[in-house]
Image (tube, coloured by chain):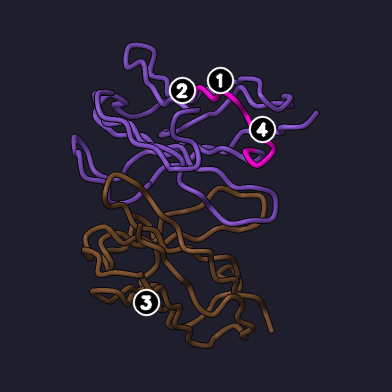
Chain colours: A brown, B purple
Amino acid sequence: EIVLTQSPGTLSLSPGERVTLSCRATQSISSSYLAWYQQKPGQAPRLLISGTSSRATGIPDRFSGSGSGTDFTLTISRLEPEDFAVYYCQHYGSSRGTFGQGTKLEIK
Amino acid sequence: QVQLVESGGGVVQPGRSLRLSCAASGFSFSDYAMHWVRQAPGKGLEWVAVTSYDGFKNYYADSVKGRFTISRDNSKITLYLQMNSLRREDTAVYYCARELNILSFNYYGMDVWGQGTTVTVSS
């Protein structure tokens, strides 16, 4: 069973800063099946990135994803006030889906 | 407008059953695999189950396997989750979500989500 571990658990940052979120898998996974989501309080998750690096429709280009093997990252180049939320990585493989535990971005 | 609307949540006693529904609109429902994802109060997301676009291939999280059944009726444009032998730890908001890629048996992400329906398992 693949486990995704996200780090850090919480980040306190200011608008305008650059941030990189980490997602590490317990074994090598195909980059085709790694996605990132954003969730704000009281809302459903929103797909940001699929296939490790492909932005979903309507996602600003300040969001980017990269990685391979067991290590994947989501980078927000310049934080906007609306980016403060919880971010999840997710993988589908071996007939099951898995989410990381999430990273909370909070305003400093 | 592409939309998913869940229903069927509520308060149920441990050991009892509940069936959730997810009504789709604005897209060709029968062309997409569909997922259920849940979120316990104050916790992260947990993938629950997926059904292929044709409904013939269904997969489950270990935590619900043997108790939950995912199904779909493409003629009614509706996804279902039959939940039996409910446990307190099944208490969560349940979301249905559309698979990203059309007509695929490989699953890459979930690009359309419903607003969720709340299930509370309590005596």
Q: Are marks 4 and 2 on the same chain?
A: yes
Circle 2 sits on which residue? B80
- Three-letter amino acid code of the residue under disc 4: Val
- Three-letter amino acid code of the residue under disc 2: Tyr
Q: Earlier in the sequence, mark 4 or mark 1?
A: 1
Distance from Cα at disc 1 to Cα at disc 3: 37 Å
Q: Residue furthest top?
A: B75
Q: Are marks 4 and 1 on the same chain?
A: yes
Q: Are the residues at dot 1 and dot 2 in contact (C-beta closer than 8 Å)? A: yes
What residue appears at the point 48 percent right and 72 percent down from the top-left corner?
A: A6
What residue appears at the point 33 percent right and 29 percent down from the top-left corner?
A: B27
Circle 3 sits on which residue? A73
Circle 1 sits on which residue? B19
Question: Tag 2: Cα neighbours inside 10 Å, few (<14), some, or many (≥20)?
Answer: many
Distance from Cα at disc 3 to Cα at disc 2: 34 Å
Circle 4 sits on which residue? B119
Secondary structure under badge 4? strand
Distance from Cα at disc 4 to Cα at disc 1: 10 Å
Q: Is residue B107 left or right of residue A58?
A: left
- Closest to the observer: A94 or B35? A94
Distance from Cα at disc 1 to Cα at disc 2: 7 Å
